[in-house]
Image (cartoon, rainbow, N blue to C red):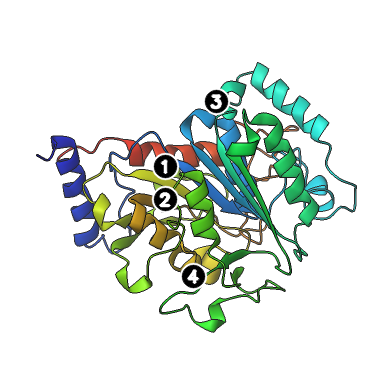
Amino acid sequence: MTSPTLLAAGLVLAAFVALPAAADRLPDLPRLGLAKTDASVIGVSSGGYMATQLAVAWPERFQGLAVLGAGPWSCAQGTLRRALGQCMTSRLGPPSLDELEQRLADYRELERVGSAEALAELRAFVWHGEKDEIVAPALGAALAEQLAGWLAAPETQLRFVQSDGVGHGWPIGRRSPPPPATELGDCHQGGGTHLLGCDRDLAGEAMAWLHKAPPGADEAAEADSLTGDLLHFDQGDFAVKGLDSAGYLFVPEACDMGGCALTVALHGCGMSAEQIGETFVRHSGLNEWAAAHERVVLYPQAETSLANPQGCWDWWGFAESTWQLDPLHDTREGTQVRALMAMMDRLQEASTPR
């Protein structure tokens, strides 16, 4: 028998999908009653840095963290100079994990991040292409080392993968039908949309590791069997500096009545819908895996601006107050962190009949 909560979730989602929005506004992000356990966050490049910020700020809210093509937590320490010279290239030398550990301890004392005990329980997946010319591969190794120091049993909780001959971006496997060739970057050089035609399903690998899927479950479902809706929603309720006006949400058919789990997927610089259309939200491979394993995928969107021309997530402090000498972007008080967590809260709230 269907519970009242699940029935209400189905009614709200049906209204979200079926009713046309007002001419000047997209629908709001719906309340779907998603499970508050088993949530995960995955991100690439700046989205990878932001994903780690979310997991460190609120580890009790996430089971899994996956990072593609990014370096250690809080690497920039609030300055663009470090972001460019230590967290993308090694021009200023490698980041000091000891310094970052002290920063974490200071934040923890002020309750600006989650507990060490909650952080120790995460499952984590780190991937980096060894031909990455945007974010140095050594930075992915530094993140893996940092995570290994936090996790209770890194040998069983952490998977670190380096791929020979692969550039900066998000590798995708073969799909039927495949995305247009113009929407794929070269596996070795990256570029374009930063979706890399490498014949490797990184989304499936990462999600299977985070959620302990059985052997073979990392293989994405065939595209023609994908069942679900990609919804375009208004981000206005969560408006902060750096967020675009609209985001995307993939809801598998099996999740129409609520009760599914949630994955937050964060694009990288140059990968927002404003810049590459719906390429990332349709072709990353996440939707196929989510449909097969009953997960809703939230695709928040960052925007371009004079302060952030590439539409990156805030991993160096640009979205904080201009007068703030020590930005709190990498804490629970960070403006973008709070906005993204508020989106999670909305999706995990029980829906109410209208």
SS at badge 1 = helix
The amino acid marked with disc number 2 is Gln
On residue 343, the disc is 1
Q: Identify residue for label 3.
A: 118
Amino acid found under the numbered disc labelled 3: Ala
Q: Residue at x 38, y 65 (%)?
A: 221
Q: Which of marks 3 and 1 is nearer the N terminus?
A: 3
Residue name at image x 41 percent, y 40 percent: 344
* Tag 1: amino acid: Met
Residue at the location (34% across, 42% down)? 347
Mark carried by residue 219: none
**What residue is shown at x 52% (from left), y 70% (from top)?**
173
Q: Residue 279 carries which label?
A: 4
Q: Where is residue 105 in the image (x, y as percent from the top left)?
A: 71, 22
In the picture as drawn, the residue positioned furthest to the left comes out as: 1
Q: Mark 2 points at which residue?
A: 235
Tag 4 or tag 2, which sits nearer the N-term?
2
**How many numbered callouts?**
4
Query: Are dots 3 and 1 in contact, CB under 8 Å?
Result: no
Mark-to-mark CA distance, 3 and 2 = 29 Å
Q: Nearer the viewer, mark 2 or mark 1?
A: 1
Residue 148 coordinates in the image, percent (x, y): 69, 35
